[in-house]
Amino acid sequence: MNLDFSDDQKFLQEEANKFFTKEDTLKRTRAIMESDEPYDKELWSKVIELGWTAIRIPEEYGGLGLSHLELCVIAEEIGKSLAPIPFSSSVYMYTEALIESGNEALKNSLLPSLADGSAVGTFAAAESLAPVSSENIQTVVTNNAVSGTKIAVPDVEAATHVMVLCKNGNNVELRSVALDASGVSVTLQANIDPSKSFYQIDFNDVESELISEDGWSRWEHLLDQAAVLVAFEQVGGAQASLDMAKAYAMERYAFGRAIGSYQAIKHKLADMYISLTLAKSNCYYGAWALSSGSSELGLAAATARVAATKAFQLCSKENIQTHGGNGFTWEYDCHLFYKRSKVLSLNLGSEAAWKEKLVTNLDKSNSIGSNQ
Amino acid sequence: MDFKDTPEQAQFREKCRSWLEANAELKVGQGRTVEGNLDEYLQKAKAWQKKKYDAGWAMLHWPEEYGGIGASPIERIIWSQEESKFDVPGGVFEIGLGMCGPVMMEYATAEQKKRYLPPMAEGKEIWCQLFSEPSAGSDVAGLRSKAVQDGDEWIINGQKVWTSGAHYSDFGILVVRHDPELEKHKGLTFFFVDMKSPGIEVKPIKQITGSAGSGSGFNEVYFNDVRIPDSQRLGEIGDGWKVAITTLMNERLAVGDARGSDIEDALTWAKEQDFNGEPLIKHGGVREKLADWFIEANGLKYTKFRTISALSRGGTPGPEASITKIVSANKLQSIGNFGIDSADMAGMLRQDSGGDLHAFQMAWLGAPGLRIAGGTDEILRNIIAERVLGLPQDPRADKGLPFKDIPQGSAN
Ligand SMILES: Cc1cc2nc3c(=O)[nH]c(=O)nc-3n(C[C@H](O)[C@H](O)[C@H](O)COP(=O)(O)OP(=O)(O)OC[C@H]3O[C@@H](n4cnc5c(N)ncnc54)[C@H](O)[C@@H]3O)c2cc1C
């Protein structure tokens, strides 16, 4: 039994933690929130220098050829630090799509640039207020040209390429579009977490390259993979929120004693700890399924995602509550986590949608999990 | 990252497994087949314990001289993982083996250990824990049963309550107050006692399950001038609290997962049960609950695996196991409630044992006890907040006072 990260992976995590602490990432996040800059360019170029965008890219394409587990530990630290960089859209989604499904030409032309940061990817799926499905996609491709409108596309200003979920006749395809191609127009969409940017993209007969013809099932697989990684971000954010609440509860006095000595506060924090611990353990299960290529990935991803969504939302909202009036100010960092928790709970589909996936997986399997 | 045993662990698991297969039946569904009245149940439980003892499995982590095989923590976990897949009687020995045994191991003399530990492991002698009193449960150090020294004996007077299994126990561990003039934690002393001693009276209490004196039943235990030899004192005079804490720490390890209906059972039931002409599992409200319970059950399972992984590498597990009882007891109550509700009007009708609905009813009736025993939900939250997160202790109204001056009010 070895449900733990290796010493090397733990070391990488510590390094990431030191790096983000040294970079004072929360301050950077706040600065992005208060400016028109879509992301922190300086931080992003440092992250590229550290090689984290290259973690999963095979060595023959200029990457490090490491596993998903290395990504998991980085993700947790990104979650803790709220780093305002286009990491997840490019690394968990676009890069993974190419590694897993891209043809040789596409891989050769893009993976080395994704590794060294000269190319950055993102993904375009949503089109309306209804959750995207294999039926309701309106964006179409004819003769390799994509037309349609996508919304809530993350990190477009940082990106050079976008993976588009579109329909070729009745078939769903995954395609790659260069964002500087003619026929692409981009509009910023205000969102509830101003440290992140989302955009509408209108595609008007834009030239594209095929990533996969088996688009819908590849998309679902990509989502499952990314769900595990984002769940680590959520666990990181939940941990940071709990740490903040704990520190404040020890310092703040009311009625002559630290508020952390009141049981209403203690029990709130204990519940946060319980939720976080359940989420973390479910994430480890997800990390195992992801890194071992298990057929349980669908179940494990949904479980990790739902648990982590609950934990981050609980911890970030109760962190505000623990801070009282200060928690509601722009000045305190509580709202940074609260807002990020909402964006992370939606960016790969809602909690309700993932619960549905979880139970569908349980319903169709005859046994629950396979281990011991 | 993997769930694989090392070759030695796999070999050990295989050894456990093949012995269990030769000596017990695998579990089917959630029905427990070993039922019957107390005497029959005790007989079966003792027979199973003896069988394990003879083969070295009873207390495998104990040294050989007390009937163990000196197994490592991991081997102990592997054994219990495998044993839990079989339909075998449990519940009777847990307090003795999980709490009394470790205290005896730490504080009894070599001779006493030789005399008492093997029969405890073998199931020949059953032990109980005499801590709680009418005025002292969560605040167990508030107990008032008295011990007065008389030569090389102590005379005990007072009352214990909620003592599980006292009615069939041979021995018990006991905390009493030897000096009410001292502060409350300082005036306590710890003993073990022969439950057949003159002056001990055991009165079963009827539980909300309707049973009294059944396998898991608890009791009032009265002490009237009971004499205990000083040689049965565990720890120094006045060290009772320290010794009790050792026991309570072990209790938290022993009282882990609440046993009974779990997510698998809820899921099977939801697939089979009809609701408006469709399987219940098609219902959105039910799906939501299944997802929540799965996250809890799966989260606990992998929390345990993280603990095992730490042990496996020779490290110390983190505090994460402290969430086990609070999560599992509440989940049990909620799953029991769901099972009963889903039978609609028929759900309230008591069922014969063996079926799923009966199991859900037992879960629902038993869960409130599990949320109290071995540390209430609230006490466990305090412990997580204070010991794991490091928040300050509650201010206390009894600090520094001689025990006799502490405000009281026992509602009994
Ligand atoms: C099935 C069962 C088996 C048991 N078996 C045994 C046994 O074998 N041996 C034994 O010695 N005891 C046994 N007990 C007793 C058990 O340990 C106590 O019932 C338990 O510790 C609670 O104590 P109490 O009943 O006095 O409740 P109280 O301590 O009076 O608690 C009443 C309520 O007040 C809350 N409360 C109390 N103190 C605090 C606090 N500081 N902060 C917040 N809330 C608080 C509690 O959480 C609870 O909700 C058993 C109990 C049960 C239900």
Image (cartoon, rainbow, N blue to C red):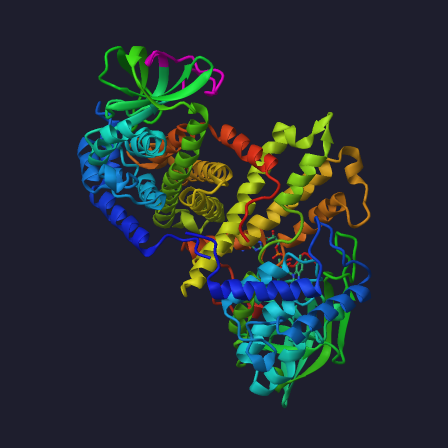
Residue B84 is left or right of residue A337, and the answer is right
- Residue A108, located in which quarter of the rendered image? top left
- Of residues B399 and A181, which is closer to you in this image? A181
Q: Residue at x 56, y 69 (%)?
A: B247
* A142 versus B409 height, above or below: above
Q: Residue at x 62, y 74 (%)?
A: B56
Label total for image: 0
Q: Position of residue A86 (x, y in %)?
A: 27, 31
Residue B71 among magenta residues? no
- Of residues B143 and B269, which is closer to you in this image? B269
User: Can residue B400 be seen from the camera position used here?
Assistant: yes
Q: Residue at x 53, y 35 (%)?
A: A358
- Of residues A312 and B139, which is closer to you in this image? A312
Residue B133 is left or right of residue B302, and the answer is right
Q: Position of residue B333 (x, y in %)?
A: 65, 45
User: Can residue B164 be seen from the camera position used here?
Assistant: no
Q: Position of residue A355 (x, y in %)?
A: 53, 32
Residue A132 among magenta residues? yes
- Of residues B240 and A26, which is closer to you in this image? A26
Q: Residue at x 54, y 30 (%)?
A: A356
In which quadrant of this rendering is ligand 1 seen?
bottom right
The span picked out in magenta is A126-149
Q: Position of residue B369 (x, y in %)?
A: 67, 53
- Residue B90, located in which quarter of the rendered image? bottom right
Of all residues shown, which one is farthest toward the bottom?
B151
Q: Main secondary structure of the magenta part?
A: loop
